[in-house]
Image: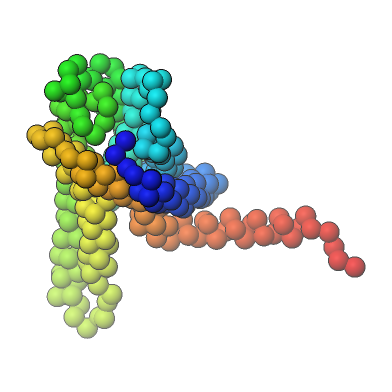
Amino acid sequence: MVLNSTEKVAIGTICLVIALFSLLVNVLVLVVIACSRNLRRHPSYLFMGSLALADAISCCCFTINFLDFHLSEPDSSFQKTEYLLNLGGVTMAFTGSVGSLLVMAADRYHAIYKVSTYKVLLTRKRALVGIVTLWVVATIISFLPLMGWSCQTCQSCSNLFPYVDRYYQAFFASLVLVVIVLILVAYALIVWSAHKHEANMSAEHPELARMRVDIHLAKTFGCVMLILLVCWLPVLSFMLTDVVTKLSNAQKRAFAFCSTLCLLNSGINPLLYTLRCRELRVALKSMVDGLRRCKGCSSPPSD
């Protein structure tokens, strides 16, 4: 309980606005993928569906538990098991989100570097197995504190999360940081491969005026890198700092506000990775046109 009344109002408003927007956008993505048979057959869109599902869960779990923890008055019924269960749900959703981003980056990397064998290697069945494996691993990692990896003494407890062991906090923050680095490396290799391809094509056919795909990918990579670092680096920095030194109340308040950036990331993800795909926009337009036609058929004829 480190926030004053003004900060509570501010952080509550921020969370509710971001959560509602993020939830609507991610649910929209899930509905479009679920309603399109062509998209459901493509492994890449299954990965996008996994990302949208994780971000939708993040919006609900994070907002409810975060606001309850920071805005409600503390009482004697605050239970360790209940808190670690709620925290595990939030952690699982964010772990699934970051893990889905890594799987999508790996998928695009193989689509560039193994064009001839990509469709043979990555079947729909293998994609589903990969998604299930991702969520199982995310669940196990997230509920380790509930399964016993919790602090036993006051010295080993986190200053940010009650009952959480500092070594687990360092493990989780380091894991997320490694995953983010792998995502950035994968996109950097994609941009480099596209750049070499464009350079070769320009050398072979200098008379052709071609749109530089590598420049477009470089801009996308820049957005990916900027968003990941802005949304996750402040939170991870506070978590790692808390492992080695005790945070002040001012730092805890800053951490609370920085945590909302992770929620913001869940709203940006569908805009950056999913809704920019032409096939999904076409499916969305087709679904909207179908709803309009159904509405027109169901309305009574005018006199």
Q: Residue at x 9, y 34 (%)?
A: 244
Q: Residue 39: image x %, image y %?
A: 47, 48
Report whether 61 appears left or right of 186.
right
Task: Name the residue nearer the viewer: 73 or 257.
Answer: 73
Establish if 14 lies above or below 278: above
* Quadrant (top left/top right/bottom left/bottom right) for the C terminus: bottom right
- Vertical side of 40 occupied by 137: above or below: above
Taking the spot 38% from the left edge, 20% from the top edge, the residue there is 76
Q: Quadrant of residue 248?
A: top left
Coloration of the structure image: rainbow
Question: Vertically, is 153 above or below 36?
Answer: above
Residue closer to the observer: 231 or 298? 231
Residue 113 is at least partly visible in this image: no
**In this rendering, position of residue 38 left or right of residue 225:** right
Question: Which residue is painted at 17% across and 66% down in the image?
Answer: 195
Percent across and percent down for residue 261 are 31, 50
